[in-house]
Amino acid sequence: MQAQSNLRNAYIALILVCIIWGTTYLANKLGVTHMPPLFFTSVRQIIAGILLLSYLFIIRKEKWPETSFIYLQILLGILLISGGNGLGIYGLQYIDSGISAILATFSPILMAFLLSITKTDHHISKWTWLGLSLGSLGIIIICLQKIGMHPGATSITGIVFTLLSVISWSAGSVYSKSRPHHHSPFVSAGFQMLFGGIPVFISSLILEKPLEFEIHFNHILIWAYTIVFGSLIAYSCFIYCLKHLPVTLVSIHNYINPILAIFLGVLILKETITIWIAVGAFITLTGVYIVTKQRG
């Protein structure tokens, strides 16, 4: 009975991950449109980290971790949050939310490639190589089309920062897998959001002068949505899914998130999706499917 309940809850959690993470691209785009990007995302991550850690250590009475674990979370926070999230949010101010979501699907493909380099027992099959090639081809098509639609430094800047964020997120994910520990993944997430948000906030103080920024009620609403739904609920659901469902099934969010992000971007933000962007997205998603199927 308990197993059936866990399985049912895991499917509900997976649905929430697919929906919420698909909508956060729109929320993030609204955030960087109305607020300094680095200030917007650093405040989100720091507050989410403080809330999660406060719950775990004050209410749940979790045991305080050893110093070596905290050092590890600082490094992972820099890779996953400062680089993976911060660079992506900074790049989002220059490109559409749908394009950002599509480029992010390259992460599972890159992780498979990094695992093949760092782990001698991780063999890449011919099908995985096909998936890697298709994913790369799709990304190239999207980038060339986006640059052609908006020639100049703006589109290139957005694409470069987004791809750098994907590289950082992938590297952090692979390194995290190589450093197992006995602590709760929620403790890890809290420390990573906190430690990863601090360098981004410092960068914001230097580059954006956020203290001169006037905060309005709509800014608070955007922050509230990304903190509560994007950082706390969706990530917790994702961890729960990984515990109770096969990895290949959980990876379905890699296909649904960009579709929802594109739809919302076109519907609400009036973003443009050309036939070549659609073709590139289809090729990339096909590559991601092949890679995740082989890895699962």
Image (tube, rainbow, N blue to C red):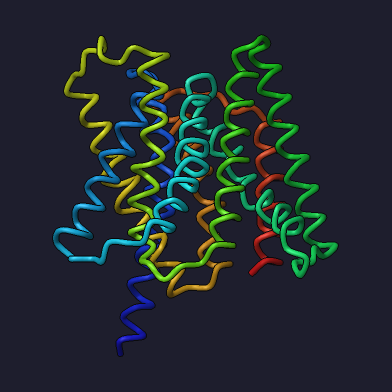
**Image quadrant in which you'd find residue 200:** top left
The image shows residue 93 at horizontal and vertical percentages of 47, 21
**Image quadrant in which you'd find residue 105:** top right
Q: Check the picture and name the quadrant holding the N terminus.
A: bottom left
Q: Is 273 positioned to the left or the right of 208 in the image?
A: right
Q: Is 80 positioned to the left or the right of 106 in the image?
A: left
Residue drawn at x 38%, y 56% is: 67
Q: Residue furthest front?
A: 67
Residue drawn at x 68%, y 48% is: 110
Task: Between residue 114 and residue 157, name the one nearer to us.
Answer: 114
Q: Is residue 16 visible?
A: no
The image shows residue 272 at horizontal and vertical percentages of 55, 24
Q: Is 166 positioned to the left or the right of 286 in the image?
A: left
**Relative to 118, does residue 285 appear above or below in the rendering?**
above
Residue drawn at x 42%, y 67% is: 241
Residue drawn at x 35%, y 84% is: 4
Q: Is residue 198 visible?
A: yes
Q: Residue furthest left?
A: 59
